[in-house]
């Protein structure tokens, strides 16, 4: 069976984020004036990293179940961590936990227990800052991923297949990325082929779409192209997705439109996760 | 009634003994004549932190409860406060602080065995369970009861568990299960955390005969047996705990 290799400290999984930092990310996100796509993307990545860290946090510290990289593509293509991790590609999650560029304080609404909501201050670690310049060299970013994953697989041939999560507004400026995407997903460990998931952030005001099983309902050619580039969710992930409340069909792909992908982290099984843990 | 009990445990392969997050408790002497016997196992969830501590608090609470766990709901606020106090004793890095806010989660299975009246052969037993740790009641070569799960396919990796966060226990009443029954002299009860229980039920469903443990088993022999099952892929790699309770 594929996609069933145990994720552990001995056999960590690899997660590589490709983040669109092109000039078009300065545009408003989802028709909301003042909310730039670049800010939305940075928040998505920082939340993803925070959730990965929390997933691996135990009483004694962080367990290195994941090695994680963030590659930016815009004016240039390369590692995109801010702060102490600047310039590094794949980093063990324990190092990420202990080296955010800074920890901000943000407020969120929480249940006050008597039917109302109160503001709660929460710590929000930041590893990636919003950046927007240049074109959208998605092909080059996928080729960069190809190189990083090839090296990873040579060291972890029997591990859980690497996962690449590409977050973009969809318009590649260095040519059709389909072939480069195919090269990434043709890489494989003995447990299966590498997975490429895509997050499409659009300036269109449209309902979020998560893990569709066809491109019929997608709003534009870029979303459809990203959908076609996206790997099908393996059956093991589909099962967890359904337990988490997503309606996913048999052909569901790792693609979301105008939504985040924090849920994907919960699809990665490292052990018992209580269903009443929210 | 005379009760002989023993306990075996092993952390997940690749983890140290200190990272074992199941817990067990046997009240009083493991082998003794008595009128009431209590024991419990708990299984701290991998994806939550300080869950080994929480599991230990739950099994101790069950074994000390004169109401055989029926007062669990009343005991929870005190246990949750104790857990928060212990976790909060030292400053934590940002991630440990946020993780602790999510709370610890654990499955709990408690067994109480009671002697019958003087003119009665055998007696009564009852269990309290939340989550996927299982009890198997064995008489001779037959499993006469499996609680709360009696089919291997019913195991998943997303059970509802007991939380150190009160807000996460809204569904507790719905997911708390109790069972009662009668025992006869010579009966054996096995309490298992989920990975071993899943293996045990799978074997029964495939028509294998029971694989009773030898009367005397060293912890090292148990560890070797579990390692073999993991190696051949019959047992999921998880913390394993087994309590055996033999009543005469």
Image (cartoon, rainbow, N blue to C red):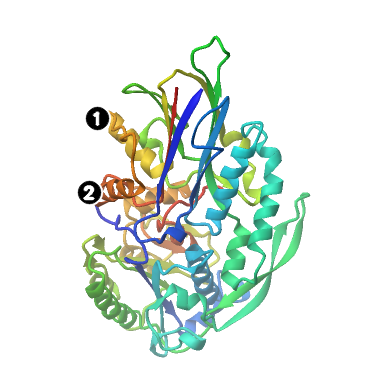
Tag of residue B208: 1
Task: Residue A258: give x, y in percent of width and height.
Answer: 50, 65
Is A142 located above or below residue B245 in the figure? Answer: below
Task: Residue A148: give x, y in percent of width and height.
Answer: 30, 79
How far is disc 1 from disc 2 in space, using C-alphas?
Answer: 17 Å
Q: Residue furthest front?
A: B32
Q: Residue at x 24, y 60 (%)?
A: A191
Quarter of the C terminus of chain A within the rendering: bottom right
The front one of B154 and B23 is B23
Q: Residue furthest top?
A: B119
Q: Quadrant of residue A88?
A: bottom left
Q: Is residue A273 visible?
A: yes
Task: Residue A237: give x, y in percent of width and height.
Answer: 37, 53
Q: Are marks 1 and 2 on the same chain?
A: yes
Residue pointed to by mark 2: B232
Tell me if mark 2 has few (under 14), some (14-19) or many (20+) residues whose alpha carbon lies within 10 angstroms of its own: few
* Mark 1 vs 2: CB contact within 8 A: no
Tag of residue B160: none
Is A205 situated left or right of B241 in this image? right
The numbered mark 1 sits on a residue in which chain? Answer: B
The numbered mark 2 sits on a residue in which chain? Answer: B
Is A183 situated left or right of A113 in this image? left
Is A29 located above or below residue B42 in the figure? Answer: below
Task: Residue B43: give x, y in percent of width and height.
Answer: 49, 47
Q: Is residue A179 visible?
A: no
């Amino acid at each position: 069976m594929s996609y069933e290799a145990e994720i552990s400290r001995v056999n960590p999984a690899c997660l590589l984020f490709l983040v669109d930092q092109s000039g078009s990310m300065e545009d408003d996100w989802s028709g909301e004036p003042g909310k730039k796509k670049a800010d939305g993307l940075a928040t998505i990545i920082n939340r993803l990293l925070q959730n990965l860290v929390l997933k691996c946090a135990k009483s004694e510290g962080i367990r290195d179940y994941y090695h994680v990289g963030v590659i930016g593509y815009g004016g240039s293509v390369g590692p995109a961590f801010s702060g102490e991790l600047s310039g590094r590609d794949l980093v063990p999650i324990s190092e990420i936990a202990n080296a955010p560029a800074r920890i901000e304080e943000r407020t969120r609404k929480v249940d006050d227990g008597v039917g109302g909501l109160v503001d709660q201050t929460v710590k929000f670690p930041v590893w990636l800052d919003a950046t927007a310049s240049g074109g959208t060299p998605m092909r080059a970013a996928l080729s960069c991923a190809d190189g990083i994953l090839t090296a990873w697989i040579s060291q972890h041939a029997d591990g859980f297949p690497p996962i690449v999560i590409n977050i973009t507004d969809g318009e590649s400026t260095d040519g059709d990325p389909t072939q480069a995407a195919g090269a990434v997903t043709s890489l494989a460990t003995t447990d299966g082929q590498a997975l490429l998931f895509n997050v499409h952030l659009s300036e269109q005001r449209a309902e979020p779409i998560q893990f569709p099983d066809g491109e019929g309902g997608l709003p534009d050619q870029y979303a459809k192209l990203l959908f076609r580039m996206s790997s099908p969710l393996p059956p093991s992930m589909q099962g967890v997705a359904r337990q988490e409340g997503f309606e996913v069909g048999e052909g569901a792909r790792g693609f979301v439109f105008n939504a985040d992908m924090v849920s994907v982290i919960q699809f990665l099984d490292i052990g018992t996760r209580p269903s009443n843990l929210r | 009634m005379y009760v002989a009990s023993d306990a075996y445990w092993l952390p997940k392969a690749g983890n140290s003994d200190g990272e074992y997050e199941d817990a067990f408790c046997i009240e009083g002497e493991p082998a003794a004549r008595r009128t009431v016997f209590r024991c419990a196992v708990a299984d701290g969830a991998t994806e939550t932190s300080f869950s080994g501590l929480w599991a230990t608090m739950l099994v101790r609470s069950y074994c000390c409860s004169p109401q055989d766990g029926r007062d669990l709901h009343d005991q929870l606020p005190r246990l949750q406060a104790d857990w928060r106090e212990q976790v909060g004793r030292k400053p934590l890095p940002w991630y440990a602080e946020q993780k602790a806010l999510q709370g610890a989660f654990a499955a709990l299975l408690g067994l109480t065995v009671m002697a019958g009246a003087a003119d009665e052969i055998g007696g009564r037993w009852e269990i309290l369970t939340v989550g996927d740790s299982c009890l198997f009641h064995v008489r001779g070569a037959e499993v006469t009861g499996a609680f709360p799960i009696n089919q291997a396919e019913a195991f998943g990796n997303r059970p509802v568990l007991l939380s150190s966060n009160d807000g996460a226990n809204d569904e507790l009443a719905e997911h708390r299960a109790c069972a009662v029954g009668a025992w006869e002299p010579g009966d054996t009860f096995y309490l298992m955390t989920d990975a071993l229980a899943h293996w045990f039920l799978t074997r029964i469903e495939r028509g294998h005969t029971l694989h009773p443990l030898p009367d005397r088993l060293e912890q090292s022999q148990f560890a070797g047996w579990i390692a073999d099952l993991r190696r051949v892929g019959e047992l999921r790699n998880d913390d394993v705990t087994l309590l055996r309770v033999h009543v005469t």
